């Protein structure tokens, strides 16, 4: 068996390190990248939870339909989404209670997203996609707010007693959540603008600053 002295071994190791140094991964940078990927996964998962709703997602009229005037047969409108949601609410006489619980669950998901997004401000590898992720969740919250409010009004019209302040409380809670997420999205966007080392993982849609509007 070939035996190498400690000096030879040390020299061999040094030569090997010199040989591969050009393609070696910086352990500190690698750790930062893995941490960023983990945080990005958490952010994306939290955003998807915000977008979950107990009704089929309403779809806007397609560009082609606007040009041709044709109807999108498979498109779900907001009114249809509300109707489908109301049909599944029970028991009778307590539908608003169930609606309030659903809205509360959605707002809890929004609060979790805000927490994760705020923590992401410390990430060394923020991208514009991260801002777009939060922005998409904000749009979902605006849509959900409108559906919950309109559904609550229809329940009231059907004869179930609902105090006006109960509906106002849902509207206010959503506005607060949207404002909070909007400010966080603005902070993320500002940090990306100020961080020249930030890179874009893939092409992302242009985002608009000042997302705190409700």
Image (spheres, rainbow, N blue to C red):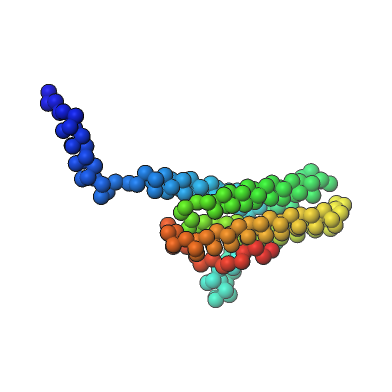
In the rendered image, residue 174, in percent from the top left (x then y), is placed at 71, 56
Q: Is residue 156 above or below residue 70?
A: above
Q: Residue furthest top?
A: 1
Please tell me which residue is depicted at 84% across the width and 46% down the height of the picture.
93
Depth check, front residue: 146 or 170:
170
Depth check, front residue: 20 or 75:
20
Residue 124 as seen in the image, left or right of residue 52: left
Q: Is residue 50 above or below residue 79?
A: above
Residue 28 as seen in the image, left or right of residue 190: left
In the rendered image, residue 197, in percent from the top left (x then y), is placed at 42, 59
Depth check, front residue: 182 or 29:
29
* Residue 45 in sight: yes
Please tell me which residue is depicted at 55% across the width and 75% down the height of the picture.
68
Q: Is residue 24 above or below residue 74?
A: above
Q: Is residue 129 above or below residue 14?
A: below
Q: Which of the 4 image quarters holds residue 6?
A: top left
Depth check, front residue: 68 or 186:
186
**Count of numbered marks:** 0
Which quadrant does the C terminus fall into? bottom right
Residue 54 as seen in the image, left or right of residue 96: left
Which quadrant does the N terminus fall into? top left
Please tell me which residue is depicted at 18% across the width and 37% down the height of the picture.
11
């Amino acid at each position: 068996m070939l035996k190498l002295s400690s000096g030879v071994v040390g020299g061999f190791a040094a030569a090997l390190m010199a040989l591969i140094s050009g393609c070696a991964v910086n352990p500190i940078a690698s750790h930062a990248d893995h941490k960023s990927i983990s945080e990005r996964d958490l952010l994306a998962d939290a955003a998807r939870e915000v977008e979950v709703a107990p009704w089929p997602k309403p779809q806007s009229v397609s560009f082609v339909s606007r040009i041709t005037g044709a109807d999108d047969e498979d498109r779900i409108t907001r009114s249809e989404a509300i109707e489908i949601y109301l049909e599944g609410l029970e028991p009778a006489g307590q539908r608003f209670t169930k609606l309030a619980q659903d809205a509360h669950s959605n707002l809890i998901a929004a609060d979790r997203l805000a927490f994760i997004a705020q923590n992401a401000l410390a990430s060394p590898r923020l991208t514009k996609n991260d801002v777009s992720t939060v922005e998409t969740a904000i749009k979902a919250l605006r849509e959900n707010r409108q559906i919950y409010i309109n559904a609550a009004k229809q329940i009231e019209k059907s004869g179930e007693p609902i105090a006006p302040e109960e509906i106002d409380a849902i509207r206010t809670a959503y506005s607060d959540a949207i404002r909070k997420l909007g400010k966080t999205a603005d902070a993320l966007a500002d940090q990306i603008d100020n961080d020249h080392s930030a890179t874009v993982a893939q092409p992302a849609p242009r985002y608009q600053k000042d997302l705190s509007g409700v």
